[in-house]
Amino acid sequence: MVSREEYRAILSGESRAVDVVAVEHELTGLWKAAAAEGEGGPGVRACVLNLIAYADGEDIGARIKEVVSQVSVRHPNRSIIIVGRPQAPSGLSAAISAHCQVPPSGGKQVCSEQVILSASGSAVDEVHGTVLPLLVSDLPVFLWWHDEPPLEGHLFRELLESCDRLLIDSADFAADRAAETLAGLRNVTSEEDVSLSDLNWSRLNHWRELIAQFFDGAPGRPYLERLDRVRVAIASIHGPDTDFTEGLLVVGWLASRLDWQMLEPARAAAEGGMSLALRGPAGPIGVELKPDHRRAGEGLHSVSLQAGSDATFSVARKVDDLDCVLVTAELPQGAGHSRVVRMDVPSDGALLSDELDVLGRDTVFEDALGRAIAFMGGES
Amino acid sequence: MAIQERLDNPLRLGMRNQRTPEPTTLVIFGATGDLTERKLMPALYSLAVDGLLPGGFSVVGFARREKSDQQFRDEMRDAVATHSSSAPLQQSVWDGFAPNIYYCRSEFDDASGYVDLAATLDRIEAEKGSRNRLYYLATPPGYYGEIARRLGEAGPRSSGDAWTRIIVEKPFGHDLTSATELNRTLHAVFDEDEIYRIDHYLGKDTVQNILVFRFANGIFEPIWNRRYIDHVQITVAESIGVEGRGNYYDQAGVIRDIIQNHAMQLLSMAAMEPPATFEPNAVRDEKVKVLRAVREILPPEAAECTVRGQYAQGVISGQRVPGYLQEEEVAPDSTAETYLALRLHVDNWRWAGVPFYIRSGKRLPKRVTEIAIVFRQPPLALFPTSQSSRIEPNVLSITIQPDEGISLNFGSKVPGHDMPMRIRPVEMDFRYGTSFGVAAPDPYERLLLDAMLGDATLFTRHDEVEAAWAFVDPITEGWAEANAGRLPSYEAGTWGPDEADTFIERDGRKWRRL
């Protein structure tokens, strides 16, 4: 049973090793001890979802624990973090901890439970049997698989069967295998009737909102069907191997929503770039994606949409303030507008939080992903 | 607004925001006042930070003090830095926002000022490609009619796909006659669907959640009626005093300051029938029906159906505070009520026989707004009560502020072998902050955005305002006729005068302890 001092340490974020078969019992004891403190106690337990996370090794496990604790204030949850070491001698151990934070609206601390299962050797493939009884009933189950999931891996498939939504980050995938991996994930999630989420898609949320805004009002709306050129710049200071997945998802989104058909898959272009030939209802559309090695950071740097020589719409990170973008519409006869909007480079915690907001299937993402896979030469 | 129209932009499919406003120029009358500084400009800046303002958005401040565009921008920058929820101020965003702020100096009754304003608007609109105008009346209420008339003389109306709208701050009139007259003046210039009467309470997430709670859950509506509900208590308590507004408050009292607007809005949302759709007029139709069904308290009944009070000096949060009559700008013989408790009935099939108790006051022990639904006791007392066992009525309480949430209390067996069984009330508690770890947006952000989008759901319609005044007026008439002299006093920091407790206890009920 948890002593008073121990539970106080656990509620302040420390992990406590527990018997694998007694995890639920220990958690119950933890909250009983907290309840005994009454009104002046450390916080209230809350849980709106189950989050299973898989980390390959302890270093990634530590990072995932940190990210999960960040999302806990917005999405109080029971998280079960599996730290797998398949190459190590077989073994399974468990630890519990809690993350308590004061919500932005104030009041008492809100606490989420965290269970860490460290599995090694053959125990990795069997750990799902320990995970499933720990899920809180009737709440949605999210599975966050860090890095490329092994599509045929036993643990992956077992956990997939028990979850509602699979979260991945295609930015972590090897660029040369991204299309194949994404196509495979789309197939297995479809087979299991599980929704698929990509944190790389969440990175585009604000970009997509600002792009859509150009065409909400009467001044910009007529140009939406007349777009004939798309230019995407990817900031990449880390060398020549630019990851175009994020840019292709943007183009995939535009193509799926505006009914643009692919004439031919992406081709390599000058200076490490990529080009695509599409056709929309009003005619051909040229797409260029290019790396910009001068820009700090990673990911999208700018998106520019052009409708002939009549109108140009662009969203571009400000060079002197990377937390902001310059949003510009240039319309005929000198009309148009320009404004600055904050767009922080989102942390993994913020991206994960955004995806945890989505409970059903994200068909817009699925459509965009299908197009992006086709652009990359994969099966559409 | 039809769904088809909202999805006219195919890129909007699946997005949280289904659209953003058209390019708009917002004109704030009374732009040097407190509301602009503390609420409006910080809300606009927050919307700009989040990219929710349309491209081509501009603000024109219109007020009597002499200043340049740049002076006004500098003042607004300080206001945003001090009051914005998006602090600290982000220089890049402000640098992009500030050039779209302009200033027009004029008296509110000076025709030439409106000519200058029209010229300024024409110039801005030519530059920005914007033809939509949103006027915001943030002046003292005495100017509302004058400004509307002047706008009618000088300003263009909605035409084609360009719209003109006007937001009117509360208080909307000071009685039924003045409210009707103001409606008539506004309607001479604007159509009803161009008029947005603001009550910032309706912009609060938790107030909107009353409708979600009632109509998105299947378990509450079947018991939300006279068959299961004994009575309803609505509390709007403030711990602050008149805060330098003694002059206004002395004329208004709590009945005009809170009851006629905030409390009646809460009443109508708690008591309304399900609307046919969540369209603005469908929702407001149902709210108006409630207000029209409220049984009139005739002047001779005012004394019996209400309890007034005035706070005396006392202690709040360890601070000694003056009594109402010692506040600045308050007449030494004032009979303005700073506390009011009243009982009303909604005469319709759902609520017949269910009293609604409303109480509101200043200098009460804490700031809290809640609606409490008190259910009937079980028809048969199976379990005996004793000193250590009590059965309380079930209460469903919806807290609007400050700790937003919903709780339900019910009786539960106390563990042990006691015979007879001991029963104690326990509480099942849902707090917004616990399940949704994000701060709710400021109501003004939501309401400004809605007005630009043309969504009037959270604004008050002319007939709602008039129906609320029609309920309030006979009560104030009754008080005036009775001329009762000094009001009962209550010590600041207490829950109102003793008479308020006696008032509800006469009906065999008691105020909730909050």
Image (cartoon, rainbow, N blue to C red):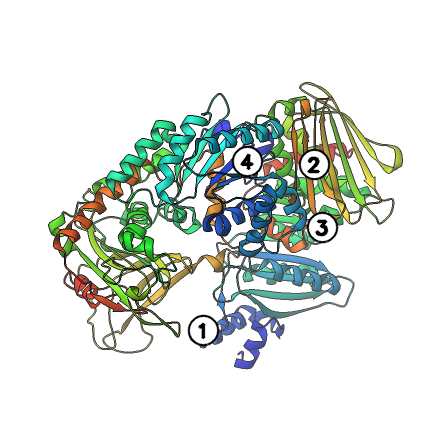
Q: CA distance from mark 3 to mark 1?
A: 40 Å
Give the foreground label among 4 and 1.
4
Give the percent coordinates (x, y) of residue B459.
39, 40
Q: Which residue is mark 3?
A: A149
Which of B13 and A126 lies nearest the eye of the viewer? B13
Judging depth in this view, the residue of B319 and B268 nearest the camera is B319
User: Please, what is the three-letter code of the amino acid marked with disc 3?
Assistant: Pro
Q: Nearer the viewer, mark 3 or mark 1?
A: 1
Q: Which residue is mark 2?
A: A250
Q: Please say if B406 is above or below A305.
A: below
> What type is the residue that disc 2 sits on?
Val
Q: In the visual, does A327 lie left or right of B64?
A: right
Tell me, for residue A35, which label it has, or none. Answer: 1
Q: Answer yes or no: is residue B279 visible.
A: no
Question: Within 10 angstroms of label 1, few (less than 14), some, or many (20 or more) residues?
Answer: some
* Element marked by disc 1: helix
Badge 1 amino acid: Ala
The quarter in which the C terminus of chain A is drawn is top right
